[in-house]
Amino acid sequence: MIKISKLNKSFGERQILRDLSFSIEKGECVSIIGKSGIGKSILLKHIIGLMKPDSGQISIDEKIINELTFQQLQKIRNKISMVFQFGALFDFMNVIDNVALPLKKLTDFSNDKIMTYAKKSLLDVGLEGSEQMMPSELSGGMKKRVGIARAISANPEYILYDEPTTGLDPIMTHSINNLIKKIHNEEKLTSIIVTHEMKTVQNVSDRVLFLDEGIIKYDGKPSEMKNCKDKTVLQFLEVSGSL
């Protein structure tokens, strides 16, 4: 379980997160949406411990991560994988080595076992046969899939996605959404998706949080967002063609 309590974060005079509180249960698939630059990715970085709040708490499995030592935090991070917005692949490594990287860092598996797990992850995302390709040879959609394969290779309990469909055409967006849903269901993960894409919210998520002005203005089922009374939420839905 992830629990956020009275989280505050500012940069200079600009307050990004304002007494933010919510929780995410084990096994949920939750999308966090809102306008660009509103703090969605910053919130995600707090959850994984890449940023510390000015005040408030983030707890994962009842451990307050912003109060842990680096070594203690690493043990929590071993349960969490993150899919970055643009894949964040290492250009000097081929596909199989990119996918195998978490296994090399987090386990004491033999190289043969690591390669077996990495190949299975590539199979799970539909990229079998791509092992020796370099990132420069991959399309945008393939890079996203490799990023997802790397994220699931070490068998995490939590997976965080930062704008997983940014820059993709509608067909590839649909394909990535289906892949996220498949992995969530088959691996029994807790999934958190930062996105501005309403099709991802509607087709993948059990629950959606709408972030605006540093607070949550909607927390509920995607299908019931249109009943929200908040003008910002309704405007977002209207502009995205979801009303």
Image (spheres, rainbow, N blue to C red):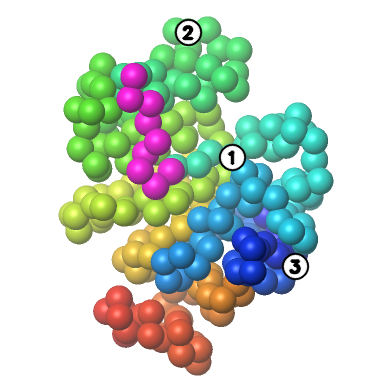
In the rendered image, residue 188, in percent from the top left (x then y), is placed at 53, 45
Q: Going by the image, does 89 lie left or right of 135?
A: right
Q: Which mark is residue 96?
A: none
Badge 1 vs badge 2, beta-carbon distance below 8 Å: no
Residue at (32, 53) in percent of width and height: 165
Count the marks: how many? Answer: 3
Circle 2 residue: 111
Residue at (40, 36) in percent of width and height: 88
Q: Is residue 238 visible?
A: yes
Q: Going by the image, does 108 lie left or right of 237?
A: right
Circle 1 residue: 80
Q: Is residue 32 magenta?
A: no
Badge 3 vs badge 1, beta-carbon distance below 8 Å: no
Residue at (31, 29) in percent of width and height: 123
**Region rendered in magenta:** 84-92
Q: Earlier in the sequence, mark 3 or mark 2?
A: 3
The dominant secondary structure in magenta is: loop
Circle 3 residue: 6
Residue mark closest to the camera, 3 vs 2:
3
Looking at the rendered structure, the kind of residue marked 1 is Ile
Identify the image quadrant of residue 224: bottom left
